[in-house]
Every structure is written in structure tokens, then in C-alpha cells.
């Protein structure tokens, strides 16, 4: 009986300590979340770093590479499309930046291992990683072929895991680093004709969150940012139309890449654009399911992919650029 009472008291004291610590952290975080409405968030300078970006053959990955190169960083450009990737490297160098390029299918683990070795030889360890490459099928679930499903999951999920694991080792050795994963609003809300794509992006959200918690638990100096944009006007979602373009417009690549860089500079954990989707997330969490289905219909989610065409030719199986039938 005495032992039970002692254990109970110890457990109670520990509980009170944990609640108090949670209260202190909560007060601090809510206070600064409020203050950041009026003042700028603290930011870090991304300058003089080795940065690897996947999918740099075109789209937002290419634009990211060009912008970050002009910030005096060395860019490691990676894409399965060799000629397009070489052009990005050439454009960076002609603009006065530093870049190297490697053709690789990052959905293949052995190629990722080889890519890491080549990166080490060319520029050394990488401190910043942008996982941009991805693909989308744009079909109804019952029309998806097994190869469609495998390709989506291999490129959008497994490739991110392979690349992140390889280059996180660099960051651990360097003593700092940042991983930015490009997800999608489809990683927050299901959408007809995007079942495999949404599944992969939901998986990417889970991967990013779990990794962030692991890193926190192990006190590793690595930050994570997950970006969730709406449809981007790069041509890969040709035919897609927003029901309410004033509130949910097709996003321009330059705008998205600017927001991505800002999110990384400010160590944002999650960035969603346009901002209306933050409020839709709250509505999703608080409204009954049948009502949320009606809200989706009202917002046009049921019809947004109705006229989807994509590009005339799909890229080769593997980690194609986000611009090529991807976001």
C-alpha cells in the first residue's frame, strides 16, 4: 500500500511538471504567433550553401534553382530529363550563378546512392534539399492501371524518402540543414480524379511530420518545411479550371517559388497557398462529414478536374519534373 501511494505521488508530481511545461511552451508559441501578425518573423539567410533540387528540368523546380542560384548558392540540379536539366544548369551559369547537373531517376534507390556519391565529389555535402519532383495521373480511381498507381507512389513518396535519407546524413555531419517537401492542397483534401496523387501527397504530409518529430526527439539540427500549393500554372494541369478563381486562383510559378523560399527562410513548418485553404482546413475539422461534402461541391472540388488534359506526352517512368503532368 505504501509503495502504491509513493508511486502515485511521483506520477502526480510528474504530471503536474509536464502540464506546467506544456503551458509555458503553449503560452510562448501562441504569444509569438499573435505578435507575428504585426511584426516580421525571424529569418535566416540562405547564402553560400549547397542546395539540391529535384525535378529541375522545368516548372517550379527550375524557377527555384534559378532564384536560389542568384542568392549566391551552388545548385545541384537533378532531373530524369537530361537535356532539360542541362539547359537549366546552362541558364544558371549564364546568369552568373553556380550549378552542376545530374540526370537521375530518384525513384530508383541505387541511382540515388550514385547521385549522392557524385554530389559529394562535385560540391561536397548538401545543406538544403528541395524535393520538388512528382507526377500525377489525373484519372478516376477505377480507370487507374497498376503501373499508374506504382509510378505515382514511387515518384511522389519513395523518391522523397530515398533522397531525404541520403542527404539528411550530410546535414547531420554539417550540423545544420533544411528539407523542403513540395506537397499539395491535395495532401490536405481529397479530390475526385486525384486519388493516387492525393494518396501520395497525404503520405508526404505524414512523412514530413513524423520526420520532424524524430529530429526533435533526437535533437538533430534539421528543419522541415512542407509546402501545399493549389494548382500551379505550369501547363501540367491543362484544362483544370477553378470554380472561384478570385478566391482560389491558378497560381503563377514565380509567386509560388517566392513563397517557398520565404517559408524556408522563416523556418515555417507548413505553408499553404492561397491562404483560404487554412480556413477550409478548420471547416473540415469542425463540420459534419455530410456538410463538408456539400462544401466541397460548393467550392468546385467535384468538377475542378473534369476537363483535365495534362500534357500531350507523359514523361518517362521515373522522377519527372513537377511541370510534367505534376504539381
Image: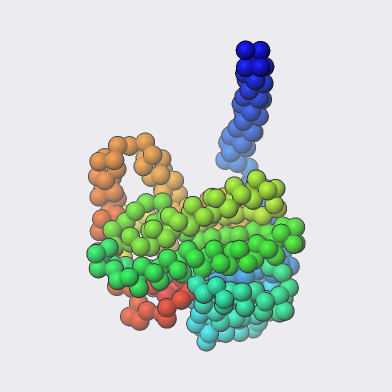
| Colouring scheme applied when the structure was drawn | rainbow
**Could you tell me which residue is drawn at 48 percent across and 57 percent down?**
204
Q: Is residue 105 left or right of residue 301?
A: right
Q: Is residue 51 left or right of residue 313?
A: right
Say if residue 70 shows up in the picture: no
**Could you tell me which residue is drawn at 29 percent across and 54 percent down?**
301
Relative height, residue 66 to residue 200 (above, below): below
**Could you tell me which residue is drawn at 69 percent across and 52 percent down?**
220
**Could you tell me which residue is drawn at 58 percent across and 38 percent down?**
33
| Image quadrant where one finds the N terminus | top right
- Work out which residue is located at the far front of the displayed protein and give it: 1
Q: Position of residue 144 (x, y in %)?
A: 29, 68
Q: Is residue 264 left or right of residue 294?
A: right
Q: Nearer the viewer, residue 169 or 92?
A: 169
Q: Position of residue 179 (x, y in %)?
A: 60, 60
Q: Nearer the viewer, residue 277 or 108?
A: 108
When asked about the image quadrant of residue 302, the answer is bottom left
Q: Position of residue 141 (x, y in %)?
A: 27, 63
- Number of callouts in the render? 0
Relative height, residue 206 to residue 253 (above, below): above
When asked about the image quadrant of residue 202, the answer is bottom left
Amino acid at each position: 500500500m505504501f509503495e502504491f501511494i509513493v508511486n502515485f505521488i511521483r506520477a502526480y508530481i510528474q504530471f503536474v511538471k509536464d502540464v506546467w511545461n506544456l503551458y509555458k511552451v503553449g503560452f510562448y508559441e501562441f504569444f509569438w504567433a499573435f505578435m507575428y501578425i504585426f511584426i516580421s518573423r525571424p529569418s535566416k539567410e540562405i547564402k553560400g550553401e549547397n542546395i539540391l533540387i529535384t525535378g529541375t528540368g522545368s516548372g517550379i523546380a527550375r524557377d527555384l534553382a534559378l532564384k536560389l542560384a542568384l542568392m549566391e548558392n551552388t545548385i545541384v540540379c537533378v532531373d530524369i530529363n537530361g537535356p532539360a536539366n542541362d539547359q537549366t544548369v546552362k541558364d544558371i551559369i549564364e546568369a552568373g550563378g553556380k550549378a552542376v547537373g545530374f540526370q537521375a531517376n530518384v525513384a530508383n534507390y541505387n541511382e540515388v546512392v550514385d547521385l549522392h556519391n557524385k554530389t559529394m565529389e562535385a560540391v561536397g555535402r548538401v545543406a538544403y534539399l528541395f524535393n520538388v519532383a512528382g507526377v500525377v495521373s489525373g484519372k478516376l480511381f477505377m480507370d487507374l492501371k497498376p503501373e499508374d498507381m506504382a509510378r505515382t507512389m514511387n515518384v511522389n513518396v519513395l523518391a522523397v524518402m530515398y533522397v531525404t535519407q541520403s542527404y539528411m546524413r550530410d546535414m547531420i555531419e554539417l550540423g545544420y540543414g533544411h528539407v523542403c517537401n513540395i506537397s499539395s492542397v491535395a495532401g490536405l483534401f481529397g479530390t475526385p480524379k486525384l486519388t493516387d496523387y492525393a494518396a501520395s501527397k497525404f503520405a508526404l504530409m505524414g512523412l514530413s511530420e513524423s520526420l520532424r518529430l524524430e529530429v526533435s526527439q533526437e535533437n538533430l539540427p534539421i528543419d522541415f518545411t512542407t509546402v501545399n500549393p493549389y494548382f500551379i500554372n505550369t501547363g501540367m494541369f491543362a484544362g483544370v479550371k477553378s470554380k472561384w478563381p478570385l478566391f482560389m486562383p491558378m497560381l503563377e510559378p514565380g509567386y509560388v517559388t517566392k513563397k517557398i523560399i520565404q517559408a524556408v527562410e522563416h523556418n515555417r513548418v507548413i505553408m499553404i497557398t492561397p491562404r483560404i485553404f487554412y480556413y477550409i482546413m478548420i471547416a473540415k475539422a469542425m463540420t459534419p462529414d455530410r456538410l463538408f461534402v456539400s462544401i466541397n461541391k460548393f467550392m468546385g472540388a467535384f468538377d475542378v478536374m473534369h476537363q483535365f488534359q495534362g500534357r500531350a506526352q507523359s514523361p518517362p517512368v521515373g522522377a519527372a519534373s513537377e511541370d510534367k503532368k505534376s504539381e
